[in-house]
Amino acid sequence: MVERRPLLDIFTHLLLLLSALALLLPVWLAFVAATQDLAGVSRIPINWLPGPHLWENLQEAWTRGGFATRFTTSLIVAVGVTLGKIVLAMLAAFAIVFFQWRARMLVFWAIFLTLMLPLEVRIVPTYAVAANALRPFQAILDATGLTALVQMLTGIEISLEWRMLNTPAGLILPLIATATGTFLYRQFFLTIPEELVEAAKMDGAGPLRFLRDVLVPLSRTTMAALATILFVYAWNQYLWPLLVTTEPERATVMVQLSRMVPRGDALPQWNIVMAGVLLAMLPPLAIVVLMQRWFVRGLVQTEK
Amino acid sequence: MAAIAFRKARKTYGANTAIHDVDLELPEGAFVVILGPSGCGKSTLLRMIAGLEEISGGDLLIHGTRMNEREPKDRGCAMVFQNYALYPHMTVAENIAYPLKVAGLPKAERQARVAEVAAALELSALLERRPGQLSGGQRQRVAMGRAMVRRPKVFLYDEPLSNLDAKLRVQMRLELRRLHEQLGATSVLVTHDQQEAMTLADHMVVMHAGRVEQVGSPREIYERPATLFVAGFIGAPAMNLLPAELVQGGRAVRIAGGPVLPLPGRARHGSAAVTLGIRPEHVQPGEIAAQVEMVEDLGSSALVHARLGEGLAMAFHTAAEAAPARGGRAGLHLPAERLHLFDPVTGRRLALERETQPALDYAPL
């Protein structure tokens, strides 16, 4: 649709500009703060222009936060969550779109409903499971009386335990179920012509072969778009890592950042915190810049 | 032995029956065309052979073996789809080689087979292209190649030419026929285009509403349509079908309120009412008066739409130069040997008993 309405154009551009400014202002403030010394960052009214101390603040934040290990943990978690989500979403959508089974629509709607449930809603049970991943099974055994039976017969008490707190698995696994990804993949799979599926059947390719040889290569752009979103999502996770990493050594970057916030009567070294913030922003920024081309293509879906 | 045989084969979707108890034998090495209007079940029948559609009842035999429950790949059939169904992310060579790759053939052999097929289809120069960079005709040939490379005993074509433009379609038709001769396999092609069917088929199957109406060579079907449906469906323009009644004990027929025409034999039928058919191209100049309504100049000939005395519509061909003027009169002759009689209730063709030698008062065409 081509419309020529100069007033509307000006208005929409103005709106865009304002939104961009509103989004960029905090980033600018963080950047300015990160370039000040303690006096500069505490000054009132605040400084709007950068000072000369950026490099030393970054170094200070890096060593004080122990960011070398924090970044490694965060990267492992973000990459793990991203890969896990993509694989799981793809397989779930594959089952929903290409197989005829009775509970298909039910499962789809169940997944779709969880789109509306954020992690926070299920955080208590999820924590219980992470504390002992085998606890649901233990509960089943207890409830059915099997534990008591076995103990009576053999004298052995069944006590299943798999602790995931403070482990990468505990950080990653509870986050990898993804309704958004499943939905995105489903939409993509629905655009695959039926004839292509049948051609693969005639050519002798089984379902997994079809997935590997046809669907995966065709969904590369979708995958890239999803990976971009998910990496940023996983990197920015705060609440879950905070709960599940009880040992400070296991913390992610985001958790570490919150620990660096000055509390009580500590020195208000916001310049160091903001330098840490800048550092924490870099990986998602790099991913978005690198994947931008694929990201747009994946969402627009022109290549068929 | 028949290459493909259906024994009381049925296909139902819930309460709907798409294919009604079909009994059909398709001879080995023949080019079989399944023809019918859209929705008649012809594609379903083809997909039942391929294994893409489950068979609800009855048996499917391919080369004598029951195939109902076999996987598509184990049936020895290859299929060419209407929209070609090429893998968009693979090159032409990869597309053609894919069935072999799945079958686990070593790379060297795959390449040799692909090269051979590509040469036969004149695709050798295009092997590194992607389907998106090819024209419709080229894509069609790649789809053919992917089917040929497995050296199947049976080729299945699901309306393969319907996405091509008219000129290319004629060309690909010849190509299909040539490939069929070369490969010596059985080909089964589904189409709604009767011209395509007539030119390609050795053996034609006409379907209507999930039933097989008639099986035979294109000539047989054209000359002796077994039902009213086939009579109306085969031939362009369609056969003239007129209400009529049998007179003189079935030795002649009277067009409703019009002339009496002698028959070349004796028709035995319970009631007098019949439907009389004659093809526009078989009508000759003669004694029956008709009012000309419209003349279509087709270049090599003219198609005249006229009405008989009682207002019955009748179309016929004449030489373009001899075409009557619109609104004028024309005299028609309906040769006895070219008449078809049908039961208007069941739609079945009525056979004639030859009692005496028919009087030859026309020149056989």
Image (tube, grey):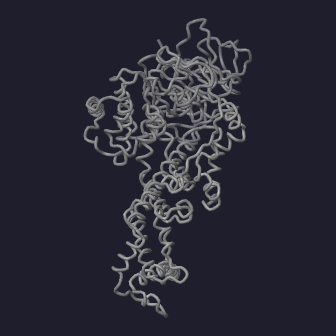
Name the residue at 63% across, 32% down.
Answer: B308
Tell me residue A287's x, y (percent): 40, 63
Count of numbered marks: 0
Q: Quadrant of residue A274?
A: bottom left
Against A157, is B225 above or below? above
Question: Could you tell me if residue B363 is visible in this image?
Answer: no
Left or right of B72, for residue B152: left
Question: Could you tell me if residue B68 is visible in this image?
Answer: yes
Given residues B206 and A16, the one toward you in this image is A16
Left or right of A21, for residue B255: right
Tell me residue A220's x, y (percent): 41, 51
Q: Residue furthest right?
A: B271
Against B84, is B7 above or below? above
Left or right of B256, for residue A256: left
Tell me residue B78's x, y (percent): 43, 28
Q: Residue furthest bottom?
A: A45
Q: Quadrant of residue B150?
A: top left
Given residues B359 and B133, the one toward you in this image is B133
Name the residue at 54% across, 49% down.
Answer: A186
